[in-house]
Image (cartoon, rainbow, N blue to C red):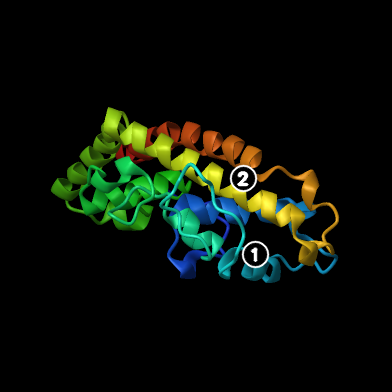
Amino acid sequence: MQLSGSPSRQSSSLDSHKCSPTVAQFIDYLKTRPRLWDNGSGRFCDWATKYIYKATSYGVPSNWPKIRPRTSLVDRLRQCVPSNTKSAIETGKEMPLLESTQNGMKASAFSNKELRRESAFRNYSFAKKVFIMRSVVGIADYLQFDDVRKQFVDGSQCIKDVWAAWQVSYRADSDASGIPRRSLENVPTLYQAWIRRVVAQVPENLEEALTDMIDR
């Protein structure tokens, strides 16, 4: 991921729904798995509106009792994010906080976006450039804290379990019979492989961004 140039990012269909970046990214990734959703129309957004955005009676994972039933899949996934008292994961109530600039760049690193636009960074004062670069280093340290690592692991497991419960109901839903190949995709397995790739890329994203900043 480069500081300069245009960020490589597909427009998220969930941006307007204020989801966690990784939650939104993974749902966008499902566009590439048409066996899961295509009823012959090729309209992913129509499918997502019905099966992801709208409240549903689909099952919820029994091992996460705080996940609210009869809510949309998106709302259930939001509860898996470490944030505040609404989080379904016990460790999520006391998420160590980052300074706002760092938090924004952390989200960019996970989303494979540029941390700072080259044109903006060039116009920063020397002191601000140093502040931004120190912030990047701080993100790497932050992600190594035991509490933070545990919360990311717990949140990821919660998301995987929510998808697993949803998948059982989705496969059995007669209303989805027009999508005959939906059982050929295993969404929890797809998510696990996908999030591992995302997390593995973050250190490289941070390192490349810092190198680009130093070179400016």
Disc 2 target residue: 164
Mark 1 or 2 closer to N-term?
1
User: Visible in this render: residue 160?
Assistant: yes
Name the secondary structure under disc 2. Answer: helix
Specify whether 195 is left or right of 141: right
Name the secondary structure under disc 1. Answer: helix
Q: Residue at x 82, y 64 (%)?
A: 39
Crowding around mark 2 (Cα neighbors within 10 Å: few <14, some 14 to 19, many 20+) is some
Q: Residue at x 48, y 41 (%)?
A: 63
- Which sits in the foreground, 85 or 204? 85
| Image quarter in which the C terminus is found | top left
Q: Residue at x 18, y 44 (%)?
A: 131
The amino acid beneath tag 1 is Tyr
User: Visible in this render: residue 1?
Assistant: no
The amino acid beneath tag 2 is Ala
Disc 1 target residue: 51
Relative to 127, does residue 210 appear above or below in the rendering? Answer: above
x and y, in percent, of residue 79 in the image: 41, 54
- Circle count: 2
Crowding around mark 1 (Cα neighbors within 10 Å: few <14, some 14 to 19, many 20+) is some
Q: Which mark is residue 104?
A: none
x and y, in percent, of residue 27 in the image: 59, 55
Specify whether 32 is left or right of 125: right
Specify whether 70 is left or right of 115: right
Q: CA distance from mark 1 to mark 2?
A: 14 Å
Specify whether 33 is left or right of 79: right
x and y, in percent, of residue 135 in the image: 23, 42
